[in-house]
Amino acid sequence: MVTACNCSICTKKGLHITFLAPQNFQLRAGEDNLKEYLFNKHVIRHQLCIDCGVEVFARGKKPDGTEVVALNVSCIDGIDLSRIALTPIDGRSL
């Protein structure tokens, strides 16, 4: 499932996110090129590329407290977003 969230950050950045359990996410390269960004309640740790400014992924917790990684699928080479059904998420209310 790939989401289209209506929160202020996702809307302004045009993020398209899929959620993964931390054990299913592996950053293979580029960790030194990331900068962390926190906003609002400071509970989601957004990881931005220091070269281009794109948000690659974020780490946080679901409302039930479960750890989660939010991956920006727009950063994956070869992804055609026009072929993916986006699921609306009301992040503005969280």
Image (cartoon, helix red, strand yellow):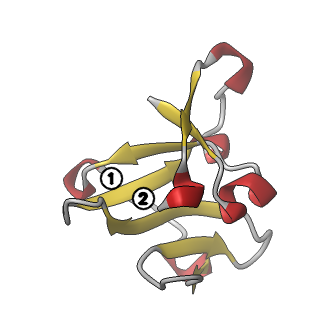
Q: In the rendered view, tell whether residue 35 sits above or below residue 74.
A: below
Tell me what residue is drawn at x 33 percent, y 47 percent.
20
Q: Secondary structure at mark 1?
A: loop
For disc 1, the neighbor class at 10 Å (few under 14, some 14 to 19, many from 20) is: few
Q: In the rendered view, tell whether residue 76 sits above or below residue 56.
A: above
Determine the image quadrant of residue 79. Answer: top right
On-image quarter of the N terminus:
top left
Which mark is drawn over residue 25? Answer: 1
Q: Which residue is mark 2?
A: 28
Determine the image quadrant of residue 68. Answer: bottom left
Q: In the rendered view, tell whether residue 50 sits above or below residue 64.
A: below
Q: Which residue is outermost to the front?
A: 93
Give coordinates of residue 24: x percent, y percent: 25, 47
Relative horizontal placement of residue 46, taking residue 14 as reference (left or right):
left
Tell me what residue is drawn at x 28 percent, y 61 percent.
63
Tell me what residue is drawn at x 53 percent, y 58 percent.
93
Q: Nearer the viewer, residue 59 or 5?
A: 5
Q: In the rendered view, tell whether residue 78 sits above or below residue 59.
A: above
Q: Amino acid at mark 1?
A: Phe
Q: Which residue is outermost to the top?
A: 83
Closer to the eye: label 2 or 1: 1
Q: Amino acid at mark 2?
A: Arg
Give coordinates of residue 62: x percent, y percent: 30, 59
Q: Nearer the viewer, residue 5 or 17?
A: 5
Gap in angstroms between the C-alphas marked 2 and 1:
9 Å
Q: Nearer the viewer, residue 28 or 45?
A: 45
Give coordinates of residue 40: x percent, y percent: 57, 82
Relative horizontal placement of residue 19, taking residue 88 as reference (left or right):
left
